[in-house]
Image (cartoon, grey):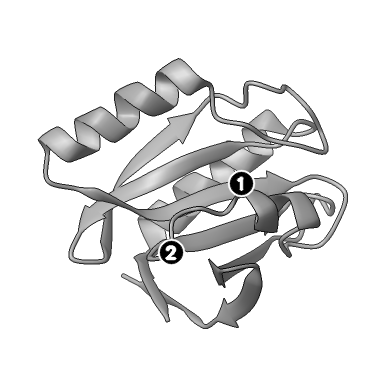
Amino acid sequence: MLSIAQELADKIVAHARADHPDEACGVIAGRNGVPERFIPMENAERSPTFYRFDSKEQFRVWREMDDRDETPVVIYHSHTATEAYPSRTDIAYASEPDTHYVLVSTREEGETEFRSFRILDGVVTEEEVEFLP
């Protein structure tokens, strides 16, 4: 289960809406599996169907997390025209076994799909999301 502060979930959704029609992406860093720090990142692809972290930005962010004794608790991105479910490409690129992969769909303007998954060895498992005050 992903337990996440409503404020952090709202920031993910706001980032996804702001970058629409391109996919948004980023990280929530934290300690001991607790999501704490919102880190929006640049989609180097600038694409409505694919995202990729800029390699220099990713290196900087991961180094900063190491310096702060944090890990990537959540890696998030948006889907702009499809449901919030990992694509084959998302599954292939999932490389953090202890991370929650959050997907937000922005396909409907007045509706938000916010879902979390574990992806391990190509196997996708949806998990419950608990929004904390």
Q: Position of residue 104 (x, y in %)?
A: 65, 56
Distance between the alpha carbons at the discs numbered 1 and 2: 17 Å
On-image quarter of the N terminus = bottom left
Q: Is residue 20 above or below residue 29?
A: above
Q: Position of residue 49 (x, y in %)?
A: 82, 38
Q: What's under tag 1, amino acid-wise?
A: His
99 or 133: nearer the viewer? 99
Q: Residue furthest right?
A: 81
Number of the label disc, if any, that sits on residue 40: none
For the point 77% across and 57% down, the residue is 87
For the point 43% across and 16% down, the residue is 56
For the point 81% across and 34% down, the residue is 48
Residue marked by disc 1 = 77
Q: Is residue 54 left or right of residue 1?
A: right
Mark 2 crowdedness (10 Å alpha carbons): few <14, some 14-19, many ≥20: few
Q: What's under tag 2, amino acid-wise?
A: Pro
Q: Is residue 38 left or right of residue 10?
A: left
Q: Position of residue 13 (x, y in %)?
A: 57, 49
Residue marked by disc 2 = 97
